[in-house]
């Protein structure tokens, strides 16, 4: 049994049983992958993938258990490498952070700036995507640390810790009638076309729940995943914007004005997450504490030990 065979198994499963796509990802030849999978099946004395001719069609029940074990083994091999790199060299390394556009654009710059000053030899890669993609990247090992407002707490493989809280803000062109009314209400918002986040993006579920609880149907005419896009369309007069408060800068957004909306919608908690079974390197801890001073190494390790005890690990 070889680690390479386990990598082939896991990647084929990740590519929906498409061996050609797995070969592209792994920069190898398709026949080699098929041969090594056959050899591993022969060694184990079981069938991992059901076949129709040369095409893989399904994962067998035994194969599913083999794949789960293979993933655990590969994760532990990766942990061994992380431990070795952490203790053998303080010179270089790579930290991959997965997050949403709003977090990357508005919440992370200060932490990233501080980290680059503290660890100038560590390469930092920021991957942007939806909350669901952030979770996926953490689960499959593409990213080390993930930051998002939603979805991180839904995965049993991840430990998600609160990082900071924020509220929504209403943005309108200067001189808009909403600026003249006292006390913003959901009823008042519903009278205008609204421009806000896509349903898969941070805090949108809180907006939907607030309107639904009050039996109000909002007139959402445009959605986007990017706060800057939302503000652009608000500037063009296409509607009233609802964005994260951190995404509004009076010095930059000079054509817009803001109205506090924290009293209308639930407070949002942005979380930072990582795999529970991942070895955290020294600079991982440092980046986490730069994100939130409360996330000290002691707090993180204590939380991890508590999770392990609760889950029987």
Image (cartoon, helix red, strand yellow):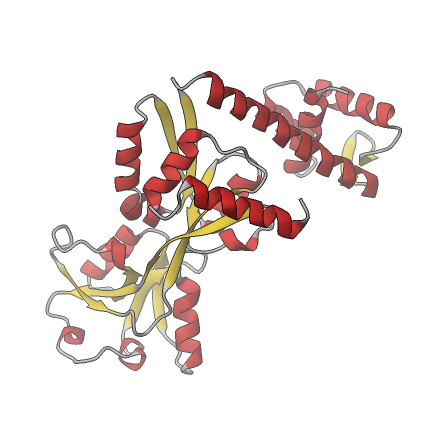
For the N terminus, give its image quadrant.
Answer: top right
Q: Residue at x 27, y 47 (%)?
A: 106
Q: Please, which residue is most extreme toward the right here?
A: 45
| Quarter that holds the C terminus | top right
* Count of numbered circles in the view: 0
Does 204 sit above or below residue 232? below
Spot occupied by residue 281 in the image (x, y as percentages of width and height): 47, 30
- Decide which of 135, 23 is in the foreground and name it: 135
> Can residue 12 be seen by looking at this rendering?
no
Expressed as whole percent of the image width and height from the top left, the position of residue 57 reads: 77, 39
Find residue 228 and report its horizontal and vertical position in percent. Answer: 26, 51
Q: Look at the image and tell me whether residue 193 can be seen.
A: yes
Q: Is residue 275 left or right of residue 264?
A: right
At a point 15% along the width and 73% down the height, the residue shown is 179
Identify the residue at horizontal 51%, vertical 48% (top origin). 303
Q: Is residue 134 depicted above or below 94 in this figure?
A: below
Q: Observer-nearest residue: 226 or 298?
A: 298
Question: Residue 66: where, in percent of width, then height?
Answer: 77, 35
- Report the side of 62 relative to 249 (left or right): right
Q: Residue at position x 63%, y 49% from top?
A: 309
Decide if residue 48 is on the left or right side of residue 305: right
């Amino acid at each position: 049994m070889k680690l390479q065979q386990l990598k082939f198994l896991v990647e084929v499963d990740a590519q929906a049983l498409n061996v050609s796509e797995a070969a592209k990802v792994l920069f190898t030849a398709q026949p080699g992958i098929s041969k090594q999978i056959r050899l591993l099946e022969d060694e184990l004395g079981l069938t991992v993938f059901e076949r129709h001719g040369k095409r893989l069609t399904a994962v067998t029940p035994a194969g599913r258990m083999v794949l789960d074990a293979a993933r655990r083994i590969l994760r532990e091999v990766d942990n061994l490498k992380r431990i070795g790199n952490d203790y053998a060299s303080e010179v270089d390394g790579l930290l991959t952070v997965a997050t949403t556009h709003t977090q990357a654009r508005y919440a992370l710059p200060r932490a990233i700036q501080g980290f680059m000053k503290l660890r100038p030899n560590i390469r930092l890669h920021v991957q942007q995507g939806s909350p669901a993609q952030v979770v996926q990247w953490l689960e499959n090992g593409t990213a080390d640390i993930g930051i998002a407002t939603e979805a991180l707490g839904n995965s049993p493989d991840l430990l998600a810790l609160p990082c900071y809280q924020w509220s929504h803000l209403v943005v309108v062109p200067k001189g808009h009638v909403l600026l003249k009314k006292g006390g913003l209400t959901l009823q008042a918002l519903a009278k205008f076309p609204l421009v806000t986040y896509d349903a898969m993006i941070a805090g949108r579920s809180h907006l939907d729940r607030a309107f639904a609880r009050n039996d109000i149907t909002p007139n959402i005419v445009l959605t986007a995943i990017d706060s800057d896009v939302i503000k652009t369309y608000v500037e063009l007069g296409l509607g009233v914007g609802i964005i994260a408060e951190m995404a509004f800068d009076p010095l930059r957004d000079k054509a817009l004005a803001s109205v506090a909306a924290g009293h209308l919608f639930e407070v949002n908690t942005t979380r930072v997450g990582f795999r529970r079974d991942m070895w955290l390197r020294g600079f991982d801890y440092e980046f986490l504490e730069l994100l939130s001073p409360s996330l000290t190494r002691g707090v993180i390790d204590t939380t991890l030990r508590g999770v392990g005890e609760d889950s029987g690990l």
